Image: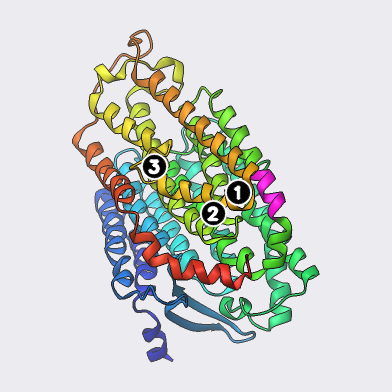
Amino acid sequence: MLEHFCECYSDLSGPILCPVLGSITPLFIPNSRIRLIRLIGLCASFITFLYSPVPRIQFDPSTAKSQFVESLRWLPYENIIFFLGIDGISLFFVILTTFLIPICILVGWSGMRSYGKEYITASLIREFLMIAVFRMLDLLLFYVFPESVPIPMTIIIGVWGSRQRKIKAAYQFFLYTLLGSVFMLLAILLILLQTGTTDLQISLTTEFSERRQIFLWIASFASFAVKVPMVPVHIWLPEAHVEAPTAGSVILAGIPLKLGTYGFLRFSIPMFPEATLCFTPFIYTLSAIAIIYTSLTTSRQIDLKKIIAYSSVAHMNLVTIGMFSSNIQGIGGSIPPMLSHGLVSSALFLCVGVLYDRHKTRLVRYYGGLVSTMPNLSTIFFSFTLANMSSPGTSSFIGEFLILVGAFQRNSLVATLAALGMILGAAYSLWLYNRVVSGNLKPDFLHKFSDSNGREVSIFIPFLVGLVWMGVHPKVFPDCMHTSVSNLVQHGKFH
């Protein structure tokens, strides 16, 4: 038994165990040694990041099967097994997760003075849960881990949030995700009754009746739509971002928003193809409304964080249009924008955090003329503004172009509305940059001026490198994902 247990923890489970050990170790260190605690957390997250690309070296892009599969029987009563695996779709999400956690620890290095030990523990537990989501091949655990991610996130918002309404925002975030997930659990239980197992790979080969597919699809949609988020269940996101600390906003924009779209790709679309085709007009309608509505709402916001939060809703709903276009262009094009959004939106929240650290306000009307006092930050902010509006040569362009191509093949009206949303996105992105950076200084509101320091610039550099690399060399993503995406399209019997 011990030998079997040890064999299970090799290529994939190493990065899962590392944050677990890193989160437990600080509990045995006194609070007075907070610098050591932070260093342990940073080292654990950085080692995990260095280890996460290792499967890519031995990854075989010619097969759509899950690779590096590991298993551990942990429940003797049912055919429920701790299955780990990775394919072309999940590979880069794991790398993105392990990239963002060290950034979050560095961002909160000096700001999280109270409960520093607990912050490190919560951050590493959150990393463990998110990595497990993208590597899990068991349906029950695929439910358990995504629904556990909001727990450390709720704690981070409620304890280290910035305003008086942080407790309300934390409860709202947790309850929205919890209520939607109840239906998902019912769907998994029904699948277990029919298939006799919760193995995702077996469930994908099981044919469900059309009526059962519709019920299971609706149940899973209730869970995933909240996480995307789709209109009208998006209200929790702006509130959570506004009240969360900078590090909390960075990781919330980077990974948890992808759990809903990843769930559609991994669960709903391949497992219930007839129901997916039946509900595609419904998804198109909700997504198109969300893109136009949130883009217009963004231009009316006065809080910097709310502007970025509402723009995230528009970007993620553009991704859902691509996924439900049910062709290689749409589904394959929807994955790079998710990864790009994890970089760009997180970096924009970092820019807002730099401004808030200096001026203690996020209201747009108090800012102006920062190009003359903060030229370094203004240049960095401009780079990510270009990426947020999907300019050619940035990380978002190729993926969103493929989404429009895939959507146009299915429904030209939806593609037109999605393109209109992208135009509105460019409009509010330029409006925001112009209001904050251009114009005259407002010394009545802003008194202390200092540009980004070396630590802050060094944090931005990896984001800039990823931004440019994804824009000028996007081929690396189709090379790894094409076989998995093609299999998903063929498996779902899409035409």
Question: Is 286 positioned to the left or the right of 388 in the image?
Answer: right
Instruction: Identify the amino acid type marked 2.
Output: Ile
| Residue nearer the viewer, 147 or 418 | 418
| Alpha carbon separation for disc pair 1 and 3 | 25 Å
Where does the magenta region start and end?
280-287
Looking at the image, do the residues carrying marks 1 and 3 touch, with CB atoms under 8 Å apart?
A: no
Looking at the image, do the residues carrying marks 1 and 2 touch, with CB atoms under 8 Å apart?
A: yes
Q: Quadrant of the N terminus?
A: bottom left
Secondary structure mostly seen in magenta is helix
| Mark drawn on residue 231 | none
**Residue beneath disc 2:** 151
Residue shown at 35%/12% (left/top)?
A: 439
| Alpha carbon separation for disc pair 3 and 2 | 25 Å
Residue shown at 48%/51% (left/top)?
A: 402
Residue shown at 28%/72% (left/top)?
A: 57
Badge 3 crowding class, 10 Å Cα cut-off, few under 14, some 14 to 19, many 20 or more, is many
Relative to 285, is 21 above or below? below
Relative to 312, is 275 above or below? below
**Of circles 3 and 2, which is in front?**
3
| Alpha carbon separation for disc pair 1 and 2 | 7 Å
**Residue beneath disc 3:** 344
Image coords of residue 132 (percent x, y): 46, 67
Question: Is 477 positioned to the left or the right of 302 in the image?
Answer: left
Image coords of residue 142 (percent x, y): 56, 68
* SS at mark 1 in the image: helix
Q: Quadrant of the C terminus?
A: bottom right
Instruction: Identify the amino acid type marked 3.
Output: Val
